[in-house]
């Protein structure tokens, strides 16, 4: 196989890496603080729609990304409030957000006219950077940068230590003067914004349209990447690339005439999910999670 | 003393019911706010929803028909939850169950056995699809949320493949072969979708009710759910409980898929894209939560949800509000149920209100 055939796979992989990694980094911040959010999928879905509408309203792609991140942050506020001061059950809240998003996006898409599909005008989509061998979204670079920044904040700053303290031993953190619930709420909001950016990227950049199944399990794959990474944003970047590769591989194979005839598309479409399962099963033994993950903090 | 205790035990049942009703009200209120925001009339919408769901014998029958698979998928989630596990794999297991049930119609068997074999095949298939979840959790520590979701997607594509390439109808390519007449559930009310599949759901409720509160196995499962550590100390094997919860859950979800395809007129077949199956598993989670993971509560919650689905169609036709609003209401109900503080705040506000009224009266 010649090198020209490999460039498209690399570019698809990088583009597929972005939403998974962004959502995973958000979840890493949240889980470090002790919140386990399985509502990523729904948050991506809502922000994809919000981002598309924002891009059209402001007439700019950046506007769309910001609206997407903002809507994610709002969902982060809801998730954060319910699970800190509200002492809610995090898994159930996550399921609630997913269900709500499923209904809300389908409902709004019908309201916008064509059922189940809404395309974003080309001139308000993100412009790709031409590189000669292919075009790259600037969001790929943003994602890499964000992974490095979050890694640095979590591991090299006092804020990072505080976030981890709240997730590891909230009672001790409380005694040390850290406001546990406020810290967790803040983590949920920042995480929400990152997950929202992932959603907006799907609609404003990668696909250029919104469907009611645009998230396609990426929120859950991101959860798997978090497990794979052991809460390390740099490993999440790597994990995101691997899953992006298989996602891209599936897309690539399904358009490649010779292979399409041999392997039915349904089996190719399974590949990212099977790989996720296998990788998570392979690494999990050596990953350690915060002690207070998933447990609401009650002051005695 | 005696009456006080009786009152307490009554409260044990009333509190969860009140909480579910409160959450239901919050969900409908949020739905109404969204409708007002988008210029619909919530009054029109909800009155047509009510008429469409429980306004006539026919609509009752349709609501019950929609409740039939939901009862089973809700039980899948509830059993796991009772054991402290979070099983959201019913969605995929029910696709596989439905595929197994249709596959049995490839062969010819005489009347009562055909139906029974199809059900057994669906139960087995559902359990087999659930088995990796338990194995991955026990041997590799993989959280069931991740493994079940991945298996749901794999099941979906597998079902797509089976529908398009193995079980396809030679005449109408968009659907599978129909379930053989010898393997169908008969209709209860002619002209409606209500069929004897609901008996399967009812039996499942009774069985789980008995299993959870009248057998040692059920006690062990609930003990493990309360506290894994202390149940372990009491000699209850955690591994056994995980296997039990997931396998039994898979059996029930497989049945849900079978009942849906073997009982629902008019096609008695799977249609490409699985429109009559998709989201039954996730709706089951919502049903289980509203039913407070209790088999009897699940019956009522499933009928409520079945009603929402049928009434939603009426709402779409006569009030012009898209059917999807129903799912928004569901999501809001779940969020309301997740938060214990919400209920506490509600009670405090109500008490304050009552006190004010009293003062005003004096």
Image: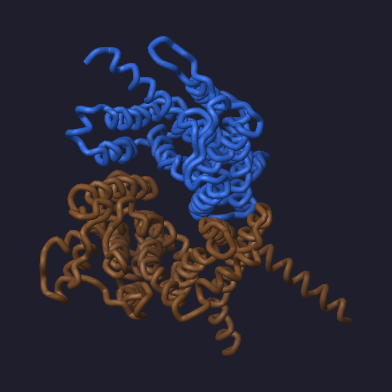
Chain colours: A blue, B brown
Name the side, left or right, on which B229 lies relative to A177.
Answer: left
The structure residue drawn at horizontal position 26% and vertical position 61%, both measured from the top left corner, is: B269
Q: Position of residue A289 (x, y in %)?
A: 44, 40
Q: Residue at x 43, y 76 (%)?
A: B296
Quarter-of-image position of residue B100: bottom left
Pinpoint residue B204: horizontal percent, then vertical percent. Answer: 32, 73
User: Residue A66 at what x, y percent from top left?
Assistant: 62, 31
Give B346 or A49, whichever is nearer the viewer.
A49
Q: Residue furthest bottom?
A: B2
- Quick check: can you spot residue A204? yes
Q: In this rendering, is residue A81 above or below A191? A: below
In the figure, is residue B122 to the left or right of B86? left
On screen, residue A190 above or below B135? above
Q: Is residue B236 visible?
A: no
Q: Nearer the viewer, residue B188 or B19?
A: B188
Q: Residue at x 63, y 39 (%)?
A: A186
Residue B134 x/y as whole percent: 29, 53
Return the residue nearer the eye: A263 or A295: A263
Residue A119 sits above or below residue B331 on the image: above
Q: Is residue A24 above or below residue B177?
A: above
| Quarter of the picture holding the C terminus of chain B | bottom right
Q: Quadrant of residue B86?
A: bottom left
Please give the name of the residue rendered at 50% of the width and 72% of the height, measured from the top-left corner: B53
């Amino acid at each position: 196989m010649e090198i020209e055939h490999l460039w498209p796979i690399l570019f698809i992989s990088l583009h597929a890496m972005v939403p998974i990694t962004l959502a995973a980094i958000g979840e890493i911040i949240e889980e470090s603080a002790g919140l386990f959010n399985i509502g990523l999928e729904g948050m991506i879905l809502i922000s994809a729609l919000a981002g598309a509408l924002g891009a059209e309203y402001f007439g700019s792609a950046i506007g769309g990304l910001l609206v997407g991140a903002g809507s994610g942050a709002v969902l982060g506020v809801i998730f954060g409030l319910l699970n800190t001061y509200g002492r809610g059950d995090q898994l159930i809240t996550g399921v609630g957000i997913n269900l709500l998003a499923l209904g809300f996006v389908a409902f709004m898409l019908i309201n916008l006219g064509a059922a189940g599909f809404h395309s974003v005008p080309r001139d308000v989509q993100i412009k790709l950077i031409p590189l000669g061998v292919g075009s790259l979204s600037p969001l790929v670079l943003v994602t890499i940068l964000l992974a490095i920044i979050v890694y640095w904040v979590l591991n090299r700053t006092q804020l990072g230590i505080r976030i981890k303290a709240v997730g590891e031993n909230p009672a001790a953190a409380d005694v040390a003067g850290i406001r546990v619930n406020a810290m967790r709420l803040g983590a949920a909001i920042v995480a929400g914004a990152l997950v929202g950016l992932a959603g907006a990227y799907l609609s404003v950049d990668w696909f250029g349209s919104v469907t009611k199944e645009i998230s396609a399990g990426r929120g859950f794959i991101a959860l798997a990447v978090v497990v794979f990474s052991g809460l390390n944003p740099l490993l999440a970047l790597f994990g995101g690339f691997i899953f992006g590769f298989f996602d891209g591989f599936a897309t690539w194979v399904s358009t490649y005439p010779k292979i399409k005839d041999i392997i039915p598309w349904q089996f190719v479409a399974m590949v990212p999910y099977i790989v996720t399962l296998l990788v998570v099963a392979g690494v999990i033994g050596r990953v350690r999670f915060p002690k207070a993950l998933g447990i609401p903090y009650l002051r005695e | 003393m005696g009456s006080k205790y009786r009152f307490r035990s009554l409260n044990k049942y009333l509190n969860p019911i009140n909480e579910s009703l409160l959450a239901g009200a919050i969900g409908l209120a949020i739905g109404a706010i969204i409708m007002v925001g988008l210029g619909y009339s919530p009054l029109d919408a909800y009155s047509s929803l009510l008429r469409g769901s429980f306004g006539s014998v026919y609509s009752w029958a349709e609501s019950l028909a929609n409740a039939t698979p939901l009862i089973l998928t809700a039980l899948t989630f509830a059993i796991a939850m009772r054991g402290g596990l979070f099983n959201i794999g019913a969605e995929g297991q029910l696709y596989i169950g439905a595929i197994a049930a249709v596959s049995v119609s490839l062969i010819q068997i005489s009347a009562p056995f055909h139906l029974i074999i199809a059900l057994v095949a669906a139960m087995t298939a559902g359990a087999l699809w659930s088995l990796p979840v338990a194995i991955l959790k026990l041997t590799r520590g993989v959280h069931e949320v991740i493994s079940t979701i991945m298996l749901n997607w794999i099941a979906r594509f597998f079902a797509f493949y089976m529908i398009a390439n193995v079980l396809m109808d030679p005449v109408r390519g968009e659907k599978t072969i129909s379930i053989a007449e010898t393997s169908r559930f008969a209709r209860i009310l002619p002209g409606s979708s209500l069929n004897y599949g609901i008996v399967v759901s009812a039996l499942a409720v009774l069985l789980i009710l008995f299993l959870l509160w009248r057998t040692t196995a059920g006690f062990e499962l609930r003990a493990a759910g309360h506290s894994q550590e202390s149940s372990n100390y009491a000699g209850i094997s955690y591994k056994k409980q995980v296997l039990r919860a997931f396998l039994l859950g898979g059996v029930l979800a497989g049945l849900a898929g079978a009942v849906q395809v073997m009982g629902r007129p008019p096609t008695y077949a799977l249609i490409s894209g699985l429109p009559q199956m998709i989201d039954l598993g996730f709706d089951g989670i919502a049903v289980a939560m509203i039913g407070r993971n209790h088999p009897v509560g699940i019956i009522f919650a499933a009928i409520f949800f079945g009603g929402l689905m049928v009434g939603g169609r009426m709402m779409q036709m006569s009030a012009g509000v898209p059917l999807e609003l129903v799912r928004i209401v569901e999501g809001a109900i779940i969020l309301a149920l997740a938060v214990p503080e919400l209920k506490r705040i509600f009670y405090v506000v109500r008490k304050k209100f009552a006190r004010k009224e009293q003062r005003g009266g004096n």
